Image (spheres, rainbow, N blue to C red):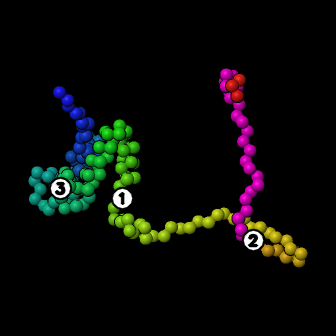
Amino acid sequence: MRLSVRTYIPNPFRCFKCQLFGHSKSNCRGTLACARCAGAGHESTDCTLKEKCANCKGDHTSFSRSCPKWKVEKEIVSTKFTQNISFTEARRLVHAQTPTEGKSYASVAKTSLAVSGTQTKPVIILTESESEQVSTSPIKDSKKPKFKKKKSMYKSERFLA
C-alpha cells in the first residue's frame, strides 16, 4: 500500500479582536473591530451593516477567503512551511514575487530610468598659450589598491601558506 504525505499548511493568523492578519487576540494591541463591517466597538454577531473587510477595505467580511490580503497571507504561510524558512523570510520572499498593487507591467515599462554616467574628474590641459582648457572625459586611476596579506593567528595556518 502506497500513501503520499502532504505538508499541512494552516490558515493565516487572524486576530479575533482587531480582525487584522499576522497575530492572535492574545497578542493584539488594536481596538475591537467587527468581523462583518470592520466597524469599531461591536461584535459581528449583532451586526447588520454592509460587509467591509478590515484588511483590504473590500466589499466582503474580514474572514473571507476571497480577500486579496488573505490570499497573500496564505501564500506566505504556504511558503514558510514548504520551504522550511522563517515567517519573516517567507514574507520577504512572497512580497518580492508579488507585483505592487495598482502598478501594471506596462506602466512600469513606460517609465524611463534615470541614466547615470561615469564619474569624471576635470582635467586641466596646458597648451603653448598656457590657457586653461577643461576636459570632462573620464580618466582611469593608474593607482591600484594594494592589499597586505593578513597574518593568521593560528600557527598551523602559517606553516601551510
Residue positioned 24% across, 36% down in the render: 6
Q: Nearer the viewer, residue 73 or 2?
A: 2
Residue positioned 74% across, 67% down in the render: 122
Q: Measured along the vertical axis of the image, is residue 54 above or below residue 83?
A: below
The answer to which of marks 3 and 1 sits earlier in the sequence is 3
Amino acid at circle 1: Pro
Q: Nearer the viewer, residue 81 or 1?
A: 1
Q: CA distance from mark 2 to mark 1?
A: 45 Å
> Are the residues flagged by discs 2 and 1 in contact, CB closer than 8 Å?
no
Residue 149 in the image, given as x and y percentages of width and height: 72, 36
The answer to which of marks 2 and 1 sits earlier in the sequence is 1
> What is the span of residues highlighted in magenta in the rendered image?
135-158
Q: Report the residue marked by disc 2.
A: 135
| Dominant SS in magenta | loop
Res 30 visible: no
Closer to the eye: label 3 or 1: 1
Name the secondary structure under disc 1: loop
**Numbered circles on residues, count:** 3
Amino acid at circle 2: Ser
**Callout 3: few (<14), some (14-19), or many (20+) C-alpha neighbours within 10 Å?**
many
Q: Measured along the vertical axis of the image, is residue 97 above or below residue 138?
A: above
Magenta span includes 150 = yes
Residue 146 in the image, given as x and y percentages of width and height: 74, 44
Taking the image as shown, residue 119 lies to the left or right of residue 5, namely right
**Callout 2: few (<14), some (14-19), or many (20+) C-alpha neighbours within 10 Å?**
few
Name the secondary structure under disc 2: strand
Q: Report the residue marked by disc 1.
A: 99
